[in-house]
Amino acid sequence: MIGELFLALTQLSSPRAVLGRVEIDGPSAGISIELPGAGSASLAIEPPLVAGERRQLELAVPLAPDSLPDGAWSRAVGETLVRDGRARLVELSKPVELGELPAELLARPRPVLGAQVARAPWSALFVLGAAFAITLSRRRQIVVVSAIALLACASVLALTLGLRPDSPEQVRLLDARLGIDAEGPWLDVRASRDSARVADLASTRIEVAPRHISLACESGSPSLGVSLRAPGATLYQLRAFDPGTRRLAREVNAFASFEEVWLREADGAWRAMGPWPLGEPLPQGPSVTQNAPPGWLVPVLPMGISIFLARTERPLDSEPTSAVPAGATWVRGLGL
Amino acid sequence: MGSAALALAWIASLAPLLLERGGALVLGGDSTSAPRSALCGLIWIALAGMPRVHIGPADLRKWSTGVLGAAPVLALALGLDISAGASRPRAVVVAGQVLLFVALSALAADLGMRSLRSRRIHAAVWFVGALGLALLDLAMSWGPRTAVPSEQGWISGAAQFSPLHWALGAVDGSPAPFAAFAFLIALCALSWLTGKERVQ
């Protein structure tokens, strides 16, 4: 238990954005503040406030990467807003701690969205080689060289612009405790590169990796949520996920239809089990697998316990389609 | 550029892309930078701007061949940058600036080859202003890795004029190109003025 808590403390990074309530005097179409060391916060007011009008609005505020004493950041934000002249900080919410989740879930490694790698296709390299050879052999004929260069540029662009990077730009991972005695909520992690849109910041913990990168928070209409930008970083949205009555057990899949399932038994070998439809028992996979699970989803995970990994392309039943990010939802569970 | 220099620039500029293809180099990619275009451009600018060996009249065909030879490689780097997540306008702007700098560097070198005097002046300015300042700034920022900021602010200020420093900065950022552009224009003018005697 102590080890588990220690692991949790060492792996958790500080939350990086909270909601603040500000009071703004009109006329104003919005506010924008810079918070050195943390990022920036801006709020667009639609329709703009007219002269004499005063309203309280919610503003997403970035937090400093290093945790500060209680109230220190609130004072810093308040003073910055006062300098702006027409806004006043009413309240800065406390960061979402997700205390209802077991520390073991929060301590699990976050999915790593690797650096974007674009591999030059052989076809483009071949075009380049041919163009260069012709350029060298016809270098006195400017018209030919120009035509070849233009043709090569167009071909190479056509061959490369459709390429997709190796690692996904955003991913959703449900981290679960499985098994007979597993109860309580799961951890819902949404990772995205460079930017994210957060539907409900009040119940979402925001983490940024690497943690020192500045975070720009843009707020507007509450129905549109909050837009976060941190170029070069991976943004994590963490919230509790209640599986409800849905369960995952080897005897029956009572959660969702999975397109692909992997299982690592206590002996440490991964096996690809193929698809696992809803209502079916866990399929029997091969003893040895050629199809390893994505490495960015299975970094350092504990040994001596079974690890389950599955992918579904469909939104889960209880959620509106708009709430689910494009791409796959992964489920990662220990103790199946 | 001569055939040998052209071949060298072509192979060297493709090297980062081939290394990334082989998994030996991770160039990454985000919306604010265009690392592949900048890295390929760094090599092309460095080689295109090198002082020429021979003295003789500037050859427009050789100059244009050098610039046109760079274009397909830069197009490949541009395509890969966009595929890796770079913002399309940003990547296009970087690739365009690289091509402009390659053209101006090569033009300055070709204008400088018209007389011994102009070649010497061009070589001195190129090695000090473009190569030297960029390397010096690199050494000053990489060498003394201490918490105390470097006092050599003038070096980084002067290095802004180096097109190589600009290309290096564009690998993971968005440096302003104006100082490097002004340097190359001035170098072209200097090479043209000092090489005039030979033409007359």
Image: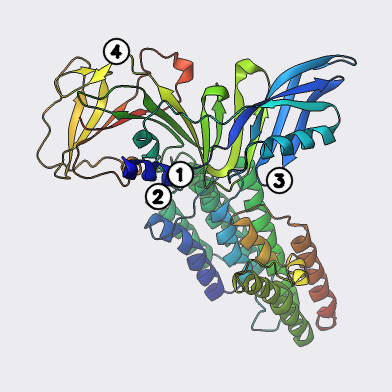
Disc 1: which residue: A159
Instruction: Looking at the image, tell me whether mark 3 or mark 2 is earlier in sequence order.
Output: 3
Q: Which residue is mark 3?
A: A36
B197 to the left or right of B20? right
Q: Nearer the viewer, mark 1 or mark 4?
A: 4
Work out how far the residue at label 1 is from the one at label 3, CA to CA, in angstroms.
Answer: 43 Å
Instruction: Note whether A327 is above or below A142 in the view shown.
Output: above
**Residue lying at 71% horizontally and 45% vertically, measured from the top left:** A36
Q: Residue under label 4, please give it.
A: A245
Asked whether, in this view, residue B156 is left or right of residue A320, the answer is right
In contact (CB < 8 Å): disc 3 and disc 2 = no
Residue type highlighted by circle 4: Thr
Disc 3 packing (10 Å; few <14; some 14–19; many ≥20): few
Q: Residue at the spot x=64%, y=83% of the render?
A: B53
Q: Chain of mark 3?
A: A
Q: Are both tags, 2 and 1, on one chain?
A: yes
Report x, y in % for residue B119.
Answer: 74, 82
Q: Position of residue A199 (x, y in %)?
A: 55, 21
Q: Which residue is located at x 51 percent, y 31 percent?
A: A205
Identified by mark 3, the residue type is Pro
Q: Nearer the viewer, residue A87 or A195?
A: A87
x then y, percent, for residue B185:
79, 65
As shown in the figure, which amino acid type bears the numbered disc 2?
Pro
Quadrant occupied by the C terminus of chain B: bottom right
Are marks 3 and 4 in one subunit? Answer: yes
Query: Residue B20 appears in which quarter of the rendering?
Result: bottom left
The residue singled out by tag 2 in the image is A121
Q: Mark 1 and 3 residues: CB-CB less than 8 Å, in contact? A: no
